Amino acid sequence: MSRRTIASGGAWEARGGYSRAVVVGDACWVAGTTDAGPDGRARHPDDVTAQALGAFEMIEAALSAAGFALAEVVRTRAFVTDIDRAGEPYLAVHGRLFRTVHPAATLVEVARLIDPSLLIEIEVEARHG
């Protein structure tokens, strides 16, 4: 099977040697995505909802570049730095975007992300069919 990689030009991709998304066959994996701007810091500091929406915008762009859509997402994983603060806002965003899709989903609290201004990081997997 062929393997395609999708780059977004994000601040961490070149430094970390990874792709925003990888496509193999009918599957697409999107790397952990934040709403980081070109400087690697949050575009929406202290706003979990805006950070989640920003991350999903980048995820949707990566999926589109790979030939996939949000409706084909089969799994989401979200990592938050404070589940008490971020849990409900994230679930509201996730629920709005995936109301009819119902992917398998995980929400986990972590000690920190790559930059202290980032409150949430999201990764998804999608499949055709």
Image: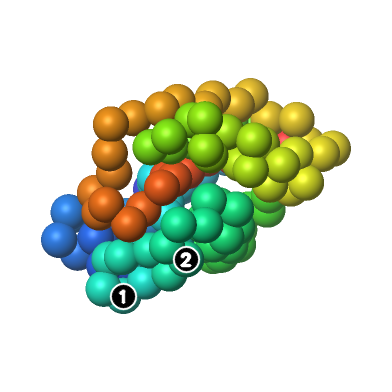
Which x, y percent locates residue 120? 44, 45
Considering every residue shown, the one lying at the far bottom of the view is: 38
* Nearer the observer, 16 or 86: 86
Left or right: 56 as drawn, with respect to 114: right
Q: Look at the picture and state if 126 lies above or below 68.
A: above
What residue is drawn where x is 45% and y is 57%? 46
Distance CA(mark 1)–CA(mark 2): 13 Å
Considering every residue shown, the one lying at the far right of the view is: 100
Nearest-to-viewer mark from 1 and 2: 2
**Given the image, on which type of amino acid does mark 1 rest?**
Pro
What residue is drawn where x is 68% and y is 47%? 93
Which x, y percent locates residue 66? 53, 58
Q: Secondary structure at mark 1?
A: loop
Q: Secondary structure at mark 2?
A: loop
Instruction: Decide: few, some or many residues near mark 1? Use Cα within 10 Å; few <14, some 14-19, many ≥20.
Output: few
Check disc 2 and report the residue beneath it: 44
Q: Is residue 29 visible?
A: no
Check disc 1 and report the residue beneath it: 38
**Given the image, on which type of amino acid does mark 2 rest?**
His
Q: Quadrant of residue 108?
A: top left
Which x, y percent locates residue 20? 38, 56
What residue is drawn where x is 32% and y is 57%? 117
Q: Quadrant of the N terminus?
A: top left
* Nearer the observer, 58 or 64: 58
Residues marked 1 and 2 touching at CB (< 8 Å): no
Instruction: Decide: few, some or many residues near mark 2? Use Cα within 10 Å; few <14, some 14-19, many ≥20.
Output: some
Left or right: 108 as drawn, with respect to 60: left
Left or right: 47 as drawn, with respect to 90: left
Q: Quadrant of the C terminus?
A: top right
Q: Earlier in the sequence, mark 1 or mark 2?
A: 1
